[in-house]
């Protein structure tokens, strides 16, 4: 085999081995790394790079070394899962940098963190006043997490004694010109409703690269053509209809899952009342359209 072909083959084998190693070691290897995982990543990368170009000794010896590193890392991760002491020894512990608005200088020195670096980390969390900080903790990954003092935190509905209904996340209902039928069912909308909304913009499903519906009934449309401005379709009446249809779907699910007859009947009655309200609103919505 010619030298260039041998190098190319070894490179492909190194890529395949690295991919396999990453799959074995899991997602942590491509997210926030602990100290040992950082060392492992660098070492395995160097070993993989040496395999294609090693000419002095047998090329497979690099693979053997990589295998030893992988097995060692794998067993250390198992040990960390089993033992808190092992986690503390290998990864270290969380360090408190700020407590009750007071910077803990000894802990800053312990982590070899300067005041400038601390302030930079706080600003990255949208915190500009140290006095506002209840706790600032340096995690084992090196990231700093911040808890604001109670009087500096944003007011929630719970603080105002207001009931917050469960809310669904915005959901993609068209991707790459294809309908996402399960997602549409989850959001409680029909293809007829979607077709009507697209027709208002002189579009079909095939014209849409991406479409997303939020719980308020707002439809975001991104067409294939990049020269077309992004479109948001929202109708207040339709938004109410969409929410009512979603509530109807949820009530039907609750009725189907309920084992208590009285509760099942209550859900069914509420669902029927919402269906009647939806039917009453549709002529109004059509007239406004």
Image (tube, helix red, strand yellow):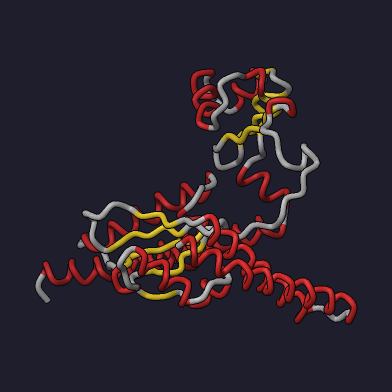
Residue 154, given in percent of the width and then of the height, sits at: 66, 33
Residue depicted at x 28% and y 57% = 50
Residue 153 visible in rendering: yes
Pick the quarter of the image with the C terminus: bottom left
Question: As drawn, is 99 to the left or to the right of 242?
Answer: right
Q: Position of residue 129 (x, y in %)?
A: 60, 19
Q: Is residue 21 left or right of residue 243?
A: left
Is residue 17 shown to the viewer in this render?
Answer: no
- The residue nearer to you, when weighing 169 against 215, is 215
Say which quarter of the image contains residue 101: top right
Q: Tell whether 267 sits left or right of 133.
A: right
* Residue drawn at x 55%, y 69% as measured from the top left: 283
Q: Relative to 269, is 91 above or below?
A: above
Q: Residue at x 60, y 41 (%)?
A: 140
**Residue 100, image quadrant:** top right
Q: Quadrant of residue 276?
A: bottom right
Q: What x and y, as percent, mark residue 227? A: 21, 54
Residue depicted at x 71% and y 24%: 99
């Amino acid at each position: 085999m010619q030298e260039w072909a041998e190098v190319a083959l070894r490179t492909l084998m190194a890529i395949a081995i690295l991919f396999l190693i990453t799959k074995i070691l899991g997602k942590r290897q491509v997210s926030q790394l602990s100290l040992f995982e950082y060392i492992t990543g660098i070492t395995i990368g160097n070993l993989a790079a040496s395999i294609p170009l090693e000419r002095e000794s047998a090329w497979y010896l690099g693979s053997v070394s990589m295998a030893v590193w992988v097995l060692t890392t794998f067993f250390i991760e198992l040990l960390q899962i089993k033992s808190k002491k092992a986690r503390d020894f290998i990864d270290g512990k969380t360090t408190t940098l700020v407590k009750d608005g007071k910077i803990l200088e000894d802990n800053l020195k312990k982590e070899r963190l300067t005041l400038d670096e601390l302030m930079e980390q706080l600003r990255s969390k949208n915190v500009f006043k140290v006095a506002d900080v209840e706790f600032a903790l340096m995690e084992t990954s090196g990231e700093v997490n911040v808890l604001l003092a109670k009087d500096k935190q944003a007011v929630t509905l719970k603080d105002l004694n207001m009931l917050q209904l469960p809310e669904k996340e915005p959901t993609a209902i068209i991707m790459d010109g294809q309908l996402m039928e399960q997602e549409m069912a989850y959001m409680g909308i029909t293809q007829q409703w979607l077709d009507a909304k697209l027709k208002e913009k002189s579009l079909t499903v095939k014209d849409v690269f991406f479409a997303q519906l939020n719980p308020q009934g707002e439809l975001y449309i991104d067409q294939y053509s990049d020269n077309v401005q992004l479109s948001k379709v929202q109708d207040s009446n339709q938004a109410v209809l969409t929410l009512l249809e979603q509530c109807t779907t949820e009530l039907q699910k609750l009725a189907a899952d309920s084992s208590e007859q009285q509760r099942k009947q209550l859900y069914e009655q509420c669902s029927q009342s919402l269906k009647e309200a939806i039917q009453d609103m549709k002529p109004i919505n059509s007239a406004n359209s």
